[in-house]
Amino acid sequence: MTTQTKAGASVAPDANVAALLSKLDALDLQQKEISQQPSPTTDLSTTLEPRPNPYSSRVILTTYPKQFGIHPLSLHWGAPTAEERGPIVASRHPDSIRIRNAIGAYGGSYCIYRALAVAIGELDPTHLPNFTLTEPPVQIGPHPQWSDPKKIVSLDPYGHLVTTAYREDIGRGTDVRPSIAITKAHMKIAEIDASVAAGRLTVDNRIVLPNGDLNVTKAAVEPVWYLPGVAERFGIEEVLLRRALFEDTGGMYPELITRPDLKVFLPPIGGLTVYIFGDPAHIGQPGKRLTMRVHDECNGSDVFGSDICTCRPYLMFGIEEAVKEAQQGGVGVIVYFRKEGRALGEVTKYLVYNARKRQAGGDRADTYFLRTEYVAGVKDMRFQALMPDVLHWLGITRIDRLTSMSNMKYDAIVNSGIEVVERVPIPDDMIPEDSRVEIDAKIADGYFSTHEGDKVALLQTKGRDWEDVAH
């Protein structure tokens, strides 16, 4: 006999679960006996000593609401303080698994490497972090947006306060971990050195140092999704969101289906980094201007200088403008999202590059998005609806200068209640020749531009031929 969850999944009663676990234990013993018998083709002289299994023979595939021994900690998303909200616990540590109140694993996409470290014996699966001296060197928040459950649904606004707000829980052995870390650093960028040499930036010994380094405050943010809020943001039912996340991750997290009572999910995806130039306390303050850029990762251009897109030039322009704002008494912010290749991934992006260069007529603006759709089935999966959450975390209510031409980013920011005073496109002289295909296709598709261009003419832009880039 089974019952139905709100998500429509069958839930086995405790007796059935116990019977299943008993069978799993028996199967585990059989597998151990079989593994200890030498194979006819095994060379015993080269057989490796088996590593000790760090886990018990009992495999907990999933849990269920009101299951015996399962008592998740209370969690109230949108509460005005961290203490009232409660800690987010996703750990399967022995002292935390019965009280965990979130689905997923700590560390975003890096949780897979943690599992590998455990498997090869490099990491004790019961290890608990020592957070001594790891607190943020600057204060961010709290802001009114933190207690609005509709403003922030894709990150934990108290994620950087975990070690202080939940000190007692951590002291009791509960595996609670920060999902946000804040630090200070110097940045060394060749383009900034060139800007100083050209006189576009001046050394002020505060933001720009005599050797050209930039003083910066950085915040790394891992995703923490409040599933009801994420579903509402995209205009879909929570049950559909859960089912899609379960199915299209290969069933990685069964509790998306079996635990409709757990509303928080830590997805195994990349996070974001915030770079703040100037005093972080000035963000959101009346009379303090803000220049910012929201940038999505492009490894080929951002790191290695590929000229097929405008990503690195626009990022460098955004940093320079942010620094100028900070030097004039305001603050500059760069938000860098890990959404490689419009969140389609770098493999897909390179396949599209090949198709663009090889197609009849060459690399053309009029087929720019079409070639992506041929490979990926969709032209863009960044879906900026969740992007403004980090701006609300920072306390932003107004952006004086937004260095972005993206209509999707602008619409998402404005629709979230943040005012944008001025939009700043990339200067023409910073656009690499081969990236005109990308930028003209985007302008024709609705990107902001200060130039009134003929859409038909824009779509006639052509990039380098394949032969020109063959190795």
Image (spheres, rainbow, N blue to C red):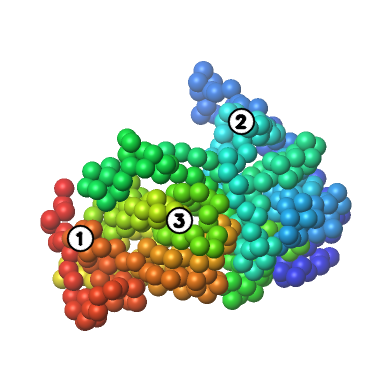
**Image coords of residue 40 (percent x, y):** 54, 29
Q: Which mark is residue 19?
A: none
**Image coords of residue 124 (percent x, y):** 65, 30
Q: Earlier in the sequence, mark 2 or mark 1?
A: 2
* Residue 187 visible (yes or no): no
Amino acid type at circle 1 is Asp
Which label sits in the foreground, 1 or 3? 3
Residue 429 falls in image quadrant: bottom left
Q: Which residue is mark 3?
A: 330
Depth check, front residue: 138 or 46: 138
Q: Which residue is mark 2?
A: 123
**Residue under the image location 69 percent in, 62 percent down:** 147
Q: Earlier in the sequence, mark 2 or mark 3?
A: 2
Q: State the separation of the CA atoms marked 2 and 3.
A: 45 Å
Q: State the separation of the CA atoms marked 1 and 3.
A: 27 Å
* Residue 316 visible (yes or no): yes
Amino acid type at circle 2 is Leu
**Is the residue 294 above or below the residue 83 in the image?**
below
Which label sits in the foreground, 2 or 3? 3
Residue 252 falls in image quadrant: bottom right
Element at label 1: helix
How busy is the neighbourhood of tag 2: few (under 14 within 10 Å), some, or many (20 plus)? Answer: some
Check contact, mark 2 vs mark 1: CB within 8 A.
no
**Image coords of residue 62 (percent x, y):** 72, 53
Residue 131 falls in image quadrant: top right
**Residue under the image location 86 percent in, 54 percent down:** 15
* Extreme residue in the left direction: 467
**Image coords of residue 266 (percent x, y):** 62, 53
**Residue under the image location 60 percent in, 47 percent down:** 139
Q: Which mark is residue 429?
A: 1
